[in-house]
Image (spheres, grey):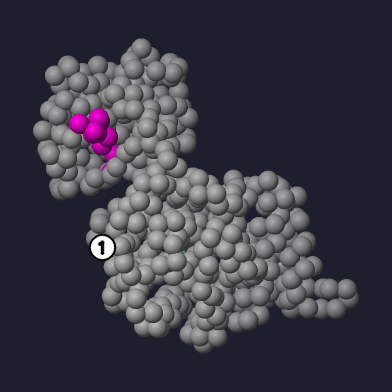
Amino acid sequence: MHLIARRLREQGFYAEIVPHSAIRKEELEDPRVKAIVLSGGPPSVHVPGAPRIPDWVLDLGKPVLGICYGFQLLAAMLGGRVETGCGEYGRTIVRVLDPGDPLFRGWGSEEQAWMSHGDCVREPPPGSRLLAVSENGYVAAFRAERQGVPIYGVQFHPEVSHTPKGRLLLANFARLAGAEAWWRPENLVDSIVRELRERIREGRVLVAVSGGVDSTVTAVLLRRAIGDRLLAVLVDHGFFREGEVEETLRMLRKAGVEPLLVDARREFMEAVRGVRDPEEKRRRIGETFARVFKRIVEENPDIRYLAQGTLYPDVIESGAAPGADRIKSHHNVGGLPSWLGLEVVEPLREFYKDEVRRLALALGLPRELAYRHPFPGPGLAVRVIGEVTEEKLEIARRASRIVEEELKKAGLYEKVWQAFAVVGDDRWVGVKGDRREEGHIVIVRVVESEDGMTADWTRLPYDVLDSISRRITSEVPGVTMVAYAVTTKPPATIEPQ
Ligand code: XMP
């Protein structure tokens, strides 16, 4: 769902996500809404309680495109035949029967497409046109009409990269619906700044900066809007990477933001001392952040607002899926509790990460910041498996720096989602010179991902792995073995803890 919206936005077509249970007729009737996409979803339209849409959605006179579940739902609503037990998974070839249809402009007669469905459409709705079929002869795309307006469905996923012409299909759909490609996040800087200035007329705004792109862009936008009524705070929890605090301060100062540096290293170390359980570790770090910020708010009674770098996916997620399993209690320096009593300001809540990177460049921030990898709020503390000790922190810190440096040297840094080193308590006997040494095992993890929800491990060239391994064992004291993590997410998560 987010990928569909992102693929459209990347191509300049503005898209918003609305849960099927929250659609309102007045909203969809707005002339700025040019078309409607129904996303993938649950396994079958036949299961009780499967999401539906009201029939009036098809009578709005606006083109509709159903994808996967959305396609099957449309087929069922319009009288086609949806059967169970005819799933197709992974890379497939679809045969396009009507390459003249505007939805398939630029497609050949056979193209690769990604499928992931358990049910299939055996017969398209009566009166509709069959546009494409799958290798198994199931319906892969159809076009129906209401009052001369097209209602399309595609069984495959045009939003994923394994459907090479999927992006094009989405753009074709937007164009045939009369949508214009006007969306450019970087053009919005002035209006965001104006809105912030209008909203925050008095009082100060607290923003917790971490050196990441989201909190930095938030701080720089606020600085432009309200000048020195912004209080940017960088809490040094001691779990930053090598040189990170200094680099963050330098970069923020250059962007006109003078942050208050709070050295809380001792406090955080005390909080996690002796803790092995990952969730407990995260809880204590979160609690310590809250305590530090409570002190700052108490010392500065003129603070009225708390600015956070919340992004669009978090806004959508927080309103949806109650009861979804929580794998880890993620938090970042922005995730501060409501009992601080501050009004929350979220200037990035309309944007995806890649759009925030574009905003960063438009604000004149360095490319290095804009394309920085995500770094968890609890920092290296979750990259140390088991108890956090000074020794293990130092190993994670130095080894991570080496991993990043080697990836940059090989021109791979911006191609991967994250790259880091992890250390735990397991040991490996080594020989250094003619001396026996029982040293630590460092695990290197480099992954590719679209959004952090799923990830694949990166097939790094052997010579890059070799330089990483050699440098870590020779430059980081106490390490005798380097291993490479070759498990996808799922089943593993990206961070070890
Ligand atoms: P996992 O380890 O759950 O991580 O697969 C998915 C993505 O989220 C990042 N991550 C965090 N980000 N606060 C954050 O802001 C956190 O507590 C946190 N824990 C994990 C992780 O780096 C990966 O990109």
The image quadrant where one finds the N terminus is top left
Can you give x and y, in whole percent of width and height, for residue 433 in the image?
Answer: 88, 73
Can you give x and y, in whole percent of width and height, for residue 279 in the image?
Answer: 42, 75
226 or 273: nearer the viewer:
226
Q: Is residue 60 left or right of residue 222?
A: left
Disc 1: which residue: 323
Q: Is residue 64 left or right of residue 164?
A: left
Label 1, ligand 1: CB separation under 8 Å: no
Which residue is at 59% across, 45% downward? Answer: 415
Can you give x and y, in whole percent of width and height, for residue 427 in the image?
Answer: 67, 76
The 10 Å Cα crowd at callout 1, few under 14, some 14 to 19, many 20 or more, is few
Above or below 193: residue 389: below
Which residue is at 30% across, 53% downward? Answer: 316
Q: Is residue 47 left or right of residue 436?
A: left
Q: Is residue 19 visible?
A: yes
Above or below 233: residue 318: above
Of the residues shown, which amino acid type is indicated by label 1?
Gly
As for residue 40 lying within the magenta part, the answer is yes
Secondary structure of the magenta portion, mostly?
loop
Segment tinted magenta in the rendering: 31-41
